[in-house]
Amino acid sequence: MPVRKFKRIEAGSFYSYLSEGCKLCRRGAKMVLFVTGICNNSCFYCPISEERRGKDVVFANEREVKRIEDAIEEANAMSAEGIAITGGEPLLKLDRVVEFLKTFKDLHSHLYTAIPAKESVLSKLKHLDEIRFHPPELRNVKAYEEPIKTAKKLEMDVGFEIPSIAYSDELVEITNKLDIFLNLNELEFSSTNYENLIAKGFRPNDHYGCSNCDEIIKAYAENVNKFHYCSARFKDKAQLRRRLIRMAKNLPDFYIITREGTVICGYIEGDVRVIEEFLQSKGLKRSEDYVVVEGGVETSVEFVEEYSSLLKKLGTNVFIIERYPTSKRVVVEVNPV
Ligand SMILES: C[S@@+](CC[C@H](N)C(=O)[O-])C[C@H]1O[C@@H](n2cnc3c(N)ncnc32)[C@H](O)[C@@H]1O
Ligand code: SF4
């Protein structure tokens, strides 16, 4: 990979230009707002999961959003400094986007879209700081020239963002001519695009990125002035891990935070009323020393180790678990005490 003008190389990612949205994202400080799973395009590489694809669902990171308060709660849980508005196609739900922009107007915002939106639409996106256009399958790139000019006029930072599927002379020419940035994502494999990508000749690497896209990446890197390449490994190893650590730090102190951003704690499974009575009799305070979760209570490792026999006599099951600090609490390891 060429290194001539690139500022930093980390986990395979490198850049000559980094937008404010990318700076925050690299620090794990962006909350991803998935505005709708609906989209009128059908890119062969679209990575959207079955759970979301084609469905009018809203998520803030992994948390399903039924009311705007759910998104606010998630933003607080990770001390978000910015929002990344995506989908599906967010501009198909313009009112929702406008509402999110208003709610989070004090945070940095960037939006992904495959629609070459007109001024009548773009001008409604008040408070939007940054916009990234994606011409589906790199077709009809010219259609984005006017929207790019309009977005610049509206004082947004503007760029293209595409996966590394092919080199496009036209896209590079417009990027340099209009002095915008290009974010090139390493083409990522998912369960929903895997067969399509294999059929087109792409091959996955260890990080579900692309093992045979190097020539395409190199060509963009050599020809685009404001360039940023974001690898699948970087997204997983740095970006996600940093967001997890931010979330973990907002949990009560009894959780042990690992380098990967997971947390380790004691988990007491059983009748919450009985467990709470016991914990409080030992001087533990709710929210500070223990947390009520689905199916039981989480508390410190030391506590469950010390009181496991008594807790079992109360009819509970006692474990030490390692889990993600996210709203879904995905458990990665369980050890009975
Ligand atoms: C999934 S799209 C959703 C928003 C909007 N529909 C769009 O296409 O811009 C968000 C971003 O993911 C990028 N993308 C799509 N498929 C990808 C893949 N398989 N690997 C890496 N990036 C991908 C797109 O270029 C876009 O910038
Ligand atoms: S435009 Fe975006 S959401 Fe729609 S199919 Fe393409 S990548 Fe997926």
Image: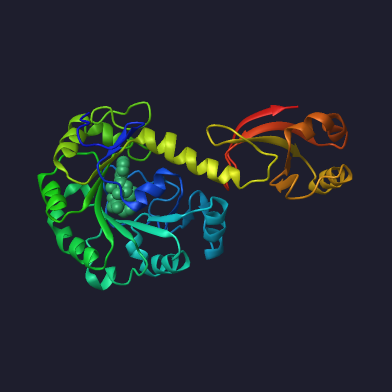
Determine the residue positioned at 44% across, 44% down. 27
Q: Position of residue 144 (x, y in %)?
A: 17, 58
* Vertical placement of residue 83 versus 3, above or below: below
Quadrant position of the N terminus in the picture: top left
Residue 264 appears left or right of 5: right
Determine the residue positioned at 73% across, 37% down. 300
Viewer-side residue, 52 vs 173: 173
Picture quadrant of residue 99: bottom left
Q: Position of residue 133 (x, y in %)?
A: 25, 55
Residue 328 appears left or right of 119: right
Q: Position of residue 213 (x, y in %)?
A: 23, 31
Which of the colour schemes (rainbow, by chain, secondary structure, one colour) is used? Answer: rainbow
On the question of residue 186 being in view, the answer is no
Viewer-side residue, 261 vs 51: 261
* Vertical placement of residue 213 versus 32, above or below: above
Quadrant position of the C terminus in the picture: top right
Determine the residue positioned at 73% across, 50% down. 287
Q: Position of residue 265 (x, y in %)?
A: 69, 35
